[in-house]
Amino acid sequence: MTTTGAAALERAVAAPDLVRAQVGVRDRFGPPRAVGVRVDLTTEPGGRALRVDVTADRVSRVALRWSRPLPGGVRVLGDAWERSYGDLAWQGLVPERPLPWTVLLHDPRTGSTEGWGVRVRGAALAFWTADPGGLTLWLDLRSGGAPVELAGRTTTAAVVVSARAEGGRPDGGGGAFAAQRALAHLQCPDPLLPTTPLVGANNWYYAYGRGFGLEAVVRDARTVSDLAGDHPVRPFGVIDDGWSVGGVADGRQASGGPWDAGRPQTFPDLAEAAAAVRAQGARPGLWYRPLLRRERPDGALAGALAQAVGAGTGAPGQRQDGWALDPSHASVLDLVREDVSRIRGWGFELLKHDFSTYDLLGRWGPAMGASPAADGPALADPSATTAEALVGFYRAVREAAGDVVVLGCNTVGHLAAGLEHAQRTGDDTSGLTWSRTRRTGVNTLAFRLAQHGALFTVDADCVPATPGTPWEQNRQLLDLVARSGTALFVSVDPATRTDAVDSALAAALRLALDAGVPGGVEPLDWFDTTTPQRWRSGTGEPAEELDLQWGEELGADPFEHTEPPPP
């Protein structure tokens, strides 16, 4: 990625000025030893990281405070618990605002930016708050909605790292992006990256899980393969939701398991479907929802229901579409390994697994705030923190997947980094309304782009070509994503194909298969808007600048809050 000449350096992490712990979820925070919790702080060699180890019988949260005045006019940026929802932005100080995983502080007087964060796969769900007097790191160690029962066990709640970039422009260009990128690399010393760029077709944003079968899947694979031409890196043809027995055409919003067969009329043989995609010159991929069952489970899984109550439901484990499972239960992990191994055995080369954060915790990212899980029962294994349970689940998927590329959607990317090749970093784009694609797709590409290649391959979600969305705006996003080198998946409704559309798709897909332009892209006006229009592209001197027009006739749609139902 370009950095506008700014030098980003790792910084030493000083010990906090104050440490407090909370045992019960409603207890006041107190000195750790006074409440029966031991917090050990260990500085790694060179002072470049601070490890936070927690030992207790029971504990809910630990807080660490660094008292230091923040500069006047400071601008602040955090990350997202799982996907972002068009809500990432540089803002002034909002002292009570949770900043998941990372906090970036930009000083407009000097142009310098410093970042603080925690390494991936820690035992706590971690967020920061920033106020005029300093920074606080909050470590949520609960098991579901209850104190974790460590029974004297020691767990590494977090490892704190920091980076700083000098030499950026006062408006945040260069330096802020360099600091964010350097911090992401410090947070994940062992990313799991695919061997080739992730490029291909996904049918969700024109089919929405309805009215398609093997013939349509083969057609889409042929389309993306033809558009890629003779490029030595082959694109993927991904079958999204709607292939399974209990798919959305049965009236559900998204499918649930079991995941042992496809629809008899349309996908009677999934191995045949994978082979048919491959025969078109594309690599087969498949979507599935690992933690949901259509019917209430019995047998070994009867005691493995996720206890969190989902939005709009009144029973623990019940979701709008079925019954959710708790991955801290050994039987659930056995089932996940079995399902993933089966999908691999069918011949699929990419696995997109979805909905697991919502299915376990019963809420989406925007509702999480300072508590990703609502107060309530513990996990099936009350000795495991929520973060530990999620990491164990991601590891089970990864190990069963073998050489299959793993793409996580609605996963906690900061806990899955190193265990998944790619992460859907933003909420859904849209084949129905452009405003949603602008709000979510452009936002997540700009504000989480620095994680690309550092934590995982970034997937800002599909670029649609559909009758319901304006091609000119989609074409600009298509070109931008292709230049960036991030994952590029397209949803192409056959009704939209013209010579001009095919020409733009072919150019973008081939550029993306080349891993984008050297140096990628960088947002330039991200301090001024949530959906940047000005971007630097490549490493040329002078670098190419893009001025993209995302607007519509009346500007952004202020009434666009949720995806309208597919027709």
Image (cartoon, rainbow, N blue to C red):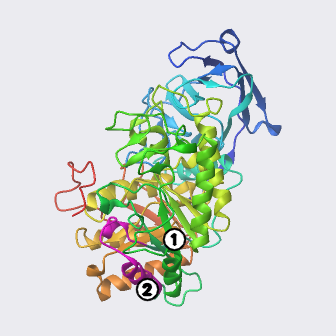
Q: Amino acid at mark 1?
A: Gly
Q: Residue furthest front?
A: 299
Position of residue 137 relative to residue 207, above or below, is above
Residue at 55% across, 55% down: 450
Provide residue 122's location: percent of width, then percent of height.
66, 39
From the viewer's perspective, tell me whether residue 410 is left or right of residue 44: left
Position of residue 161 relative to residue 377, above or below, is below
Quarter of the image with the N terminus is: bottom right
> Which residue in the structure is indicated by mark 2?
222
Residue at 71% across, 12% down: 33
Provide residue 526's location: percent of width, then percent of height.
42, 51
Provide residue 312's location: percent of width, then percent of height.
31, 38
Quarter of the image with the C terminus is: bottom left
Q: Residue furthest left?
A: 554
Stretch of the chain drawn in magenta? 202-225
The part of the image, by quadrant, that contains residue 43 is top right
Classed neighbour count for the residue bearing mark 1: other residues with Cα under 10 Å, few (<14), some (14–19), many (≥20): many
> Which residue in the structure is indicated by mark 1?
285
